[in-house]
Amino acid sequence: GAVVSQHPSRVICKSGTSVKIECRSLDFQATTMFWYRQFPKKSLMLMATSNEGSKATYEQGVEKDKFLINHASLTLSTLTVTSAHPEDSSFYICSARDGALYEQYFGPGTRLTVT
Amino acid sequence: AQKVTQAQTEISVVEKEDVTLDCVYETRDTTYYLFWYKQPPSGELVFLIRRNSFDEQNEISGRYSWNFQKSTSSFNFTITASQVVDSAVYFCALPAPAGSEKLVFGKGTKLTVNP
């Protein structure tokens, strides 16, 4: 199956700093990527839909100025958590859609801890 | 609105037992897709199956089988002769709305298979 990578897999940062998470589709081009957030023992919640070359579409309640998304190429989307706070600590997962209808491939996730 | 309910929060079985994970969904769409994903302790979501609502035939893949009942809006997942490696959280998901690339996930069922 298609491979999606995320980097870093784990990151610890201090409160007030910004953190960038990369999501790459390794063997296919992804015009659309998705960013999810998962709290411990909870389900995945969609944060935003990232479209190559255009602005991301954020879900209701997600602060676009706090969670900056850039989809600069067909294989790379980045999520930047700006001025991170402890409550931003979570597991962030990206997914990418390939040419197959409705099929999304998920990255391995990034565990963010803000101290 | 689209909704996915996985009523079983946690299930624990002994190796070689069969186990069924329930998924009930709500949708206003007449045609739609349904998905199952596996999330092992490592965190990465693994795609298991995509089922079109047109196709109500049960599907079997090795020890995995799926029972889709449109009349009861259920899409249950059965693991036969469970193994320790099957221990994971399993999510059922539905596009929201149909035709959308966004996925709505159930809360997940944590399956623990004990040796």
Image (cartoon, coloured by chain):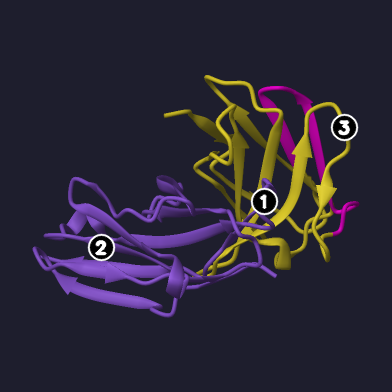
**x and y percentages locating residue A31 in the rendered image:** 71, 28
Quarter of the image with the C terminus of chain B is: bottom left
Secondary element under disc 3, as helix, strand or loop, is loop
Q: Amino acid at mark 1?
A: Lys
- The reply to the same-chain question for discs 2 and 1 is yes
Q: Chain of mark 1?
A: B
Q: Are marks 2 and 3 in contact (CB under 8 Å)?
A: no
Q: Which residues are magenta?
A: A63-79
Q: Marks 1 and 3, how far apart in space?
A: 17 Å
**x and y percentages locating residue A29 in the rendered image:** 63, 21
Position of B71 compared to B16: left or right?
right
Foreground residue among A62 and B27: B27
Foreground residue among A90 and B6: B6
Position of B79 compared to A48: left or right?
left
Q: Chain of mark 2?
A: B
- The reply to the same-chain question for discs 1 and 3 is no
**Residue ID at (16%, 60%):** B82
Is tag 2's residue or tag 1's residue first in the polypeptide sequence?
Answer: 2
**Residue ID at (57%, 53%):** B32
Q: Residue B75: which numbered mark, if any?
A: none
Q: Chain of mark 3?
A: A
**x and y percentages locating residue B104 in the rendered image:** 61, 61
Q: Residue B102: which numbered mark, if any?
A: 1
Secondary element under disc 2, as helix, strand or loop, is strand
Q: Amino acid at mark 3?
A: Ser
| Residue B29 sits in quarter | bottom right
Q: Residue B78: which numbered mark, if any?
A: 2
Is residue A64 in the magenta section? yes
How many other residues sit within 10 Å of disc 3, few (<14), some (14-19) or many (≥20)? Answer: few
Colour used to depict chain A in the structure image: yellow
Residue carrying label 3: A54
Q: Marks 2 and 3, how far apart in space?
A: 41 Å
